Amino acid sequence: MPSVHTSEIVRLENAHKIYLMGNQEVRALAGVTISFERGSFWAIMGPSGSGKSTMMNILGCLDRLTKGSYFLEGDDVSTLDDDALSEFRLRHLGFIFQSFNLISQLTVQRNIELPLYYLGWDGAQSAARARELASRVGLEARLNHRPPELSGGQMQRVAIARALANDPQVLFADEPTGNLDTATGEQIMRLLGELNNQGKTIIMVTHETHIAAHAKSKLHMKDGLIEKIDRV
Amino acid sequence: MKQTRLARNVLLGIENLLLHKLRSFLTMLGVVFGVGSVVAMLAVGEGASKEALEQIRKLGSNNIIISAIKSVEDEATGTTRSFMSIYGLTYEDYRRLSETFNTVIKTVPVKIIRKEGRLRERGMELRVVGTTSVWFGLVQRPIVAGRTLFPSDQEGQAPVTVLTEYGARRLLATENTIGQTLRIGSDVFKIVGIVKSEGGEAGNIQIPDQQVDAYIPLEVARVYFGDISFRITAGSFEREMVELHQVIVQVNHAENVEATARAIEEMLKRFHKKKDYIISVPFALLKQAEATKRTFNIVLGSIAGISLLVGGIGIMNIMLASVTERTREIGIRRALGAKRKQIITQFLIETVVLSTIGGIVGIGLGIFIPILITYFAGMPTVITLWSIVLPLCISAGIGIIFGLYPAARAAEVDPIVALRHE
């Protein structure tokens, strides 16, 4: 029992998320209970409208539950206010998006430094960290380029470097290969796999089975509920 | 630490603004012209009033100047018909003025005589002023050489003269001339000193020793030259009898000046049948000039204020557009952990940096324009410290006021929506 608890990093309890669309209630999450272990690599799958994106936003502390509880590292984050959630994202979470979400006017270095800036690091420290992360994803030669000068795969690698800047407990990936060709997608997935092997907890949303195949566990969602769990 | 953080934020703000050079520049223009016009207008206003104020101050703000004028009736009847016109202040007036009022601390009589003067070979019509030693205590004039008139010159009726710098130049006299003799009319005077003189006019009052060539003791002037003067004008022969042309009175305190001037007026009215004198109060003129200047500044300030307001609205407009355009960026920053407050700070700093740089450029413009005005139009302009500090503060303030709303809008961006924003 204690060992189970120490290995658990994320837990949802009876999680509900209800949107109002006009006067119609949409239950994006309809009472989900699940926990993810430290060091795991999950793929959340399901057709559109299944609630997987909502699940991702909730887990990523970008959105709040209508009902239920969400524990991250044992802390109940469902009660936190906007500032506290921002602080939580800043210190504990990393994000990778389908459309990379780099700031196109800023150089690769500045993009990677963004979380460090909000963490209050000074210029020299951030620059060193950015260089280290860029070389980790193989882009140290591109530090002074701007995102539009990079290929899709390179941009996603910058995004991964940025997501790792704050050394997050959990790395969230939202369709990380959605805008990439198959070969590049595979490269990105291998990079994520490596990070997982180094101990990073990764939670990924995808609808592609061959991408999900890189994950160690799969969570299938349907109509705001868990349909099926495949553990390796 | 806090300071370096702010410095870093400002640097990042500048970096961000430099990403859109043209837009930032155009946004700034409103403030540039606003601040520029404030500084320039204040400089022109200040310059215009300063000259007048300076001249009035030279007359002495505690002084009252009573001058002899030919009365309106005399002018109307025509001097050509009257054998001799008698007008102006009398020695008796001078005595009364110096004895009657306890607020009056100094009284100076002035008798103006035009006489042929001759210094060595150079001869010309001189404007000679008969006065007392008090003159030099009332109107501060630095001594160029020699000395001024002494009370003993007055008592002893010493035939001495003090040249003004202006007069000395006309007579081609130098410092070496001290001790030499100046012939005025048929009499011989010893030059004992040269003093600096003031030129120019202040409103309708003449600066006392503008166009004065030499001072002599009043008693000497009276005894040697009498009170009657002749003038030949356009074929007619004019005779005037004036005892004193001017009496300058110094009052102990500025607040007594106006009351004393009124009392003097009352007194003179009693002894003069005609109004053959005019009382000028530099202090009243000073107050009036200052009031005018204040009004002028308020009007100019309001106009400039409106242009600054327009500049500020321009900034707000662009910043709002910028927020919309950068919704995605804001979403990214928020997702990565930026708090609302930090987003507000970022946008506010950008706006303040923009408006402050605009303000600085505007001040440059505002300093440059008056230089051009002075150069081409010959108008005096004065740039005071507050006419620079004030617009700078205002421009920074504009950045804050007009930056707050766009920044608040930016902070309201929902990261989930923003990240989906294309």
Image (cartoon, coloured by chain):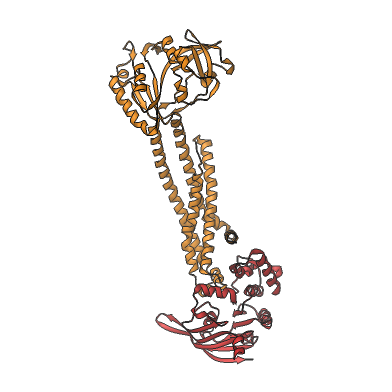
Chain colours: A red, B orange
Residue B74, quarter of picture: top left
- B73 lies above or below B385: above
Q: Position of residue B241 (x, y in %)?
A: 36, 13
Instruction: Specify whether residue B53 is in view.
Output: yes
Q: Provide residue A213's location: percent of width, then percent of height.
A: 64, 87
State how many labels appear.
0
In the rendered image, the vertical position of residue A10 relative to residue B176, given as above or below: below
Asked whether, in this view, residue B287 is left or right of residue B408, the answer is left
| Viewer-closest of A202 and B193 | B193
Q: Is residue B127 visible?
A: no
Question: Looking at the image, which residue sits at the far top?
Answer: B186
For the N terminus of chain B, the image quarter is bottom right
Pinpoint residue A207: horizontal percent, then vertical percent: 58, 85
Figure check: B80 above or below B49:
above
Residue in the image at 39% along x and 32% along y: B253
x%, y% of residue B374?
52, 37
Quadrant holding the C terminus of chain B: bottom right
Residue appearing at x 62%, y 82% in the figure: A202
A38 is higher (above) or lower (below) than B391: below
Viewer-proximal residue, B127 or A76? Answer: A76
